Amino acid sequence: MGMLTATRPRKVTAEGTAVTLTWRAKLRRDWPLLVMNLPMLLIVVAFWWVPALGNVIAFQDYNPYTGGITGSPIIGFTNFALLFQDPQFLRAIANTLSITAFQLVFYFPVPIMLALLLNSIISARLRAFVQGVVYMPFFFSWVLVIAIFQQMFGGAGLLAQILRENGHQGVDWMTNSDTFILLITSQTIWKDAGWGAIIFLAALSTIDPNLYEAAAVDGARRWRRMWHITLPGLRPVIVLLLILRLGDALNVGFEQFMLQRSAVGSQASEVFDTFVYWSGMRTGDLGYGAAAGLFKGLVGLLLILAANRVAHALGERGVYSRS
Amino acid sequence: MSVLTSRPRGGRLAPWEERPSPVGQLGKGTLITLIVVAVLGPLYVIVLTSLSSAATVNRVGGLVLVPDGITFEAYRQIFSDTVVSRAVLVSTGVTVVGTLISAGVSILGAYSLSRPGSFLHRPLLFSILLMFVFFPGIIPVYLMVSGLGLKDTYWSLILPTAVSAFNVVVLRSFFMNIPGEILDSARIDGAGEFRILWRIVLPMSKAVTAVVAMFYAVGYWNAWFNAMLYIDDTRKWPLALILRQYVVDSNPLPSATAGVTGDAPPTLAIKMAIVVIAVIPALIIYPFVQRHFTKGVIVGAIKG
């Protein structure tokens, strides 16, 4: 995950002398870079910095009509206190965490196994074809994936249609809240597992083929080579992605749940992000919703920082590294 | 694609490798077939149903598995009506304009951050990296968008998601891997930063630029929630909202004019045709960019 590396030490070139320049001289030299940065900076300020600071409404009895952000009364941590008395909020936390845990067991290993399978295909053509096919659903929107699942497993879907033709009762998995966690996990596998395999394939490609040959010469059969060479070769990536996933435990997806909330009901489908939306936008209590959003953002921040600490402690690079 | 495996080119067994057992090979073949069918099967059924006549759909009582005459009637109906055609135009426009803006802004921004030690380098980089670890929340962003008067404008579908920190960092790490000597010699020859970016850096980064542009384009085409949040005017709805309203929820479309959008429930063929229209752009650009995935972004990312 070097792509997320903050800064990377660079070969010393002409810039090596830059350290000694005054800021005026630097500005005179680098102003074109600042001009290039400006459009991005404007967007980030408008849609990240200002909203991030706008979270003060979480501490207000916010009313957009009478007070706005400057005139609404400050009520301290009342909104946060109310959150923890709200059964729906607690349900959202419980659902989010159980979905994360469930998918850690039933989704996380799938891309790894898929990568091993793809890697074991001998014909280069067939492998390229299968790769092309399994990556594809990653580029479909959630609306589309859900529409497709509905056509397959919904009350009027293909499965129900086939069952009825053969004299059985139809099924409707799209509205069943008991099996919702299975439904969303299979949707996630269908959409993302292929794409998720790429990173493991890349890791597999870095394993020295001579290791396999040497092991084979020494009499190690297929499964022993997998156990003693392939899996240890994948270990750093697996550990890293596992840690990152834990750091991201509060994010289980948003549109996937928003889109299916009305079909299965909020009991099963309420997660952190949908709670923020429904409690804030739908009930109109924006300060309360913002408090839920801010709580999630801050806990998420702590989790990511902690996960990164663990990654560093294990000798991995983590999401970011200090330059 | 062969970059991505530990196998030699040409797809042969290595000399030391044992022949796979027939049972193992059969099992693997079955598994691969199942996986391919799981992805392509639904697409096949959906495309076929969208190309079937209402009579065929009625006869089989739902989705069509076996072709029985191909007709473009569903598509003709969709495009003879303004609602879906307009949504396709809106989605296309937002995707094209959004991708141009996002790619342009990100390339300029990533290049401006690719030189450690330059003026304000650290704080500017930090402001991008913060986006990875903290999301300000749906509600403050919503208030900002409506505060700027962007509600019910197409800009609300573009600007809030115009900069993806991930894409900027991917571009930046590629730009940083370009040997400094090349840039320095251009600088000595009197080239300014814009010229260096346009003439030297971009031509050397075609693959990563293509992949990043595609990520942005796919994001804009697929986006549903922002439109749901910001666009109340049904005439400005992108395709994703139509898909939700009409295909997933089976609600009649708003501002009914004729044909598809009457009060009659949507027919299955028309629903499936809308699904196909929503998939097509991804399927068209996908093969062009696919070969870059492995060489371009991901491998560079993991090998660091």
Image (tube, rainbow, N blue to C red):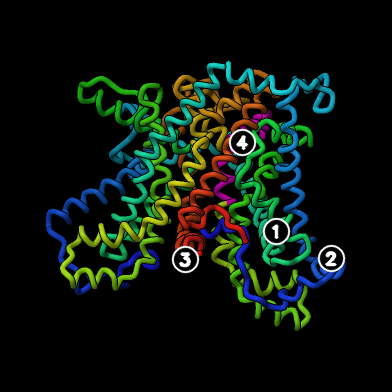
Q: Residues within 10 Å of mark 2 (few under 14, many from 20)?
A: some
Residue range in magenta is B216-239
Q: Say which chain tag 2 marks.
A: A
Q: Is residue B32 magenta?
A: no
- Identify the element where label 1 is drawn: helix
Residue lying farthest to the right in this orientation? A24
Which x, y percent locates residue B205? 59, 68
Q: CA distance from mark 3 to mark 1?
A: 23 Å
Residue lying farthest to the left in this orientation? B22
Amino acid tagged 2: Trp
**Closer to the eye: label 2 or 1:** 2
Q: CA distance from mark 2 to mark 1?
A: 21 Å
- Identify the element where label 2 is drawn: helix
Q: On the image, numbered disc 4 is attached to which residue? A: A297
Q: Say which chain tag 3 marks.
A: B
Q: CA distance from mark 4 to mark 1?
A: 25 Å
- Identify the element where label 3 is drawn: helix
Which mark is first along the chain, 1 or 3?
Answer: 1
Q: On the image, numbered disc 3 is attached to which residue? A: B295
Prevailing secondary structure of the magenta residues? helix
Which residue is located at x 51 percent, y 64 percent?
Answer: B304
Which mark identifies residue A23? 2
Q: Are marks 3 and 1 on the same chain?
A: yes
Which x, y percent locates residue B26? 16, 53
Q: Residues within 10 Å of mark 1 (few under 14, many from 20)?
A: many
Which x, y percent locates residue B219? 57, 46
Q: Is residue A38 above or below residue B206?
A: above
Which x, y percent locates residue A75? 75, 20
Residue A230 vs residue B99, the one in the foreground: A230
**Closer to the eye: label 4 or 3:** 4
